[in-house]
Image (cartoon, rainbow, N blue to C red):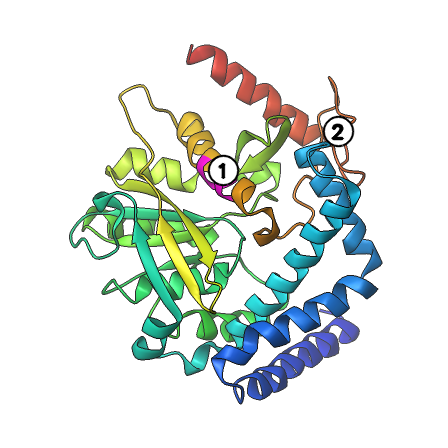
Amino acid sequence: MNSFKHYRYKLEYLGLVIAAWLVQRFPWRWLRPVGFFAGALVFFFDRKRREVAFANLKAAFGETYDEQERQGIARKSYQIFAATMLELLWSPRLTPQIMDEIADIEVVDLRSSPQLEGVPVIYCCAHAANFEWTGQIIARYTKKFPVIAQKFKNPLLGSLFNRWRSSLGQEVILQEKAMLKLFRYLKTGGKFGIVVDLNLKPHEGPIIVRSFERLLVPLTRLPAELTLRTGAILVPVECLMRPQGGYKLRFLEPISVTSESTVESLTQAWWNALESAIRRHPEYWLWSYKHWRYRPSQGETDFYPFYANEFPPFDALLKTALSTAKCNT
């Protein structure tokens, strides 16, 4: 590590520690209004990511929303993300009693309930609304609840974020070390959660799914693989913002698994469920993130966002996915 990066990492760490200390002085009901104000300011000044958000909305929805509506969705997305980050920094103050005040749950199907003991469940959610507190809320109802997290480029931040994310007892597991550990855990009737990232690299062994009807994107195979290997129930989770403050978690119907199910079909199915939730509340999703970095070199691709590029390993992954699909039909 060069000296510049070393000092930059230290400054990032120190800045977050100071910010967390300040945020934790607030009552929790202040966090959303303060976050919305900060998010609106960032939206106004952050031209580059604002353009990414507009491009993503156009790529996903076409002409469903006009320019003014896209601007409103993008601004609200910034505001919600800012509030989510403030709430994450506030996490050390969480207690079971405070969480009962902040959040409640809605169970669409009894099998999806985190209160059902002895049944292995994999919960999947998108980077929408307060995805950071989704694991905290579920942990309120389970004895043990591991959450999968990706590794930070800045190694100093990993332990800091893990501490915030495990305030109510979750165990944070790095994604590259998760498969074997979670396989054993599910076999004993455990439950765990994963926040879905659409930006996997082709060499990480993802599954290609179709998002928003036309955008091809690599997605983690981990939930589907573990479902088929362990018999666990695969449950999409939607985080909803309560108008009076706080959140409601909606546990959707488990993804149907049959003898015909494959890793590819299950991955597409649970993404479809999460995408339906995003369509209901597009302002909840993180539109300023570069979700679709790769585009195919063949076929119609004009609708991909401006930052998407052709990438030979992605084309190779698409070719493999096509071959697999033919073999499964």
Image quadrant occupied by the C terminus: top left
Q: CA distance from mark 2 to mark 1?
A: 20 Å
Q: What residue appears at the point 75 percent right and 50 percent down from the top-left corner?
A: 71
Q: Which mark is residue 211?
A: none
Tell me residue 304's x, y (percent).
74, 32
Q: Nearer the viewer, residue 9 or 237?
A: 237
Q: Nearer the viewer, residue 247 or 214?
A: 247
Q: Does any portion of residue 193 appear in the rendered image? A: yes
- The single residue placed furthest to the left in the displayed view is 118
Q: On screen, 177 above or below 27?
A: above
Tell me residue 241's x, y (percent).
48, 60
Q: Nearer the viewer, residue 56 or 268?
A: 56
Give amino acid for label 2. Answer: Phe
Tell me residue 174's x, y (percent).
46, 58
Q: What residue appears at the point 53 percent right and 89 percent down from the top-left corner?
A: 25
Q: Which mark is residue 303?
A: 2
Magenta highlight on residue 202: no
Give amino acid for label 1. Answer: Ser
Tell me residue 178's x, y (percent).
39, 52
Image quadrant occupied by the N terminus: bottom right
Residues rendered magenta in the picture: 273-277
Q: What residue appears at the point 65 percent right and 58 percent down from the top-left corner?
A: 76
Quick one: SS at disc 1? helix
Q: On screen, 299 above or below 51?
A: above
Q: What residue appears at the point 84 percent right and 57 percent down from the top-left corner?
A: 47
Quick one: SS at disc 2? loop
- Few, some or many C-alpha atoms within 10 Å of disc 1 (few <14, some 14-19, many ≥20)? some
- Few, some or many C-alpha atoms within 10 Å of disc 2 (few <14, some 14-19, many ≥20)? some
Mark with earlier residue (2, 1): 1
Find disc 1 in the rendering and name its residue.
Answer: 276
Q: Does any portion of residue 172 appear in the rendered image? A: no
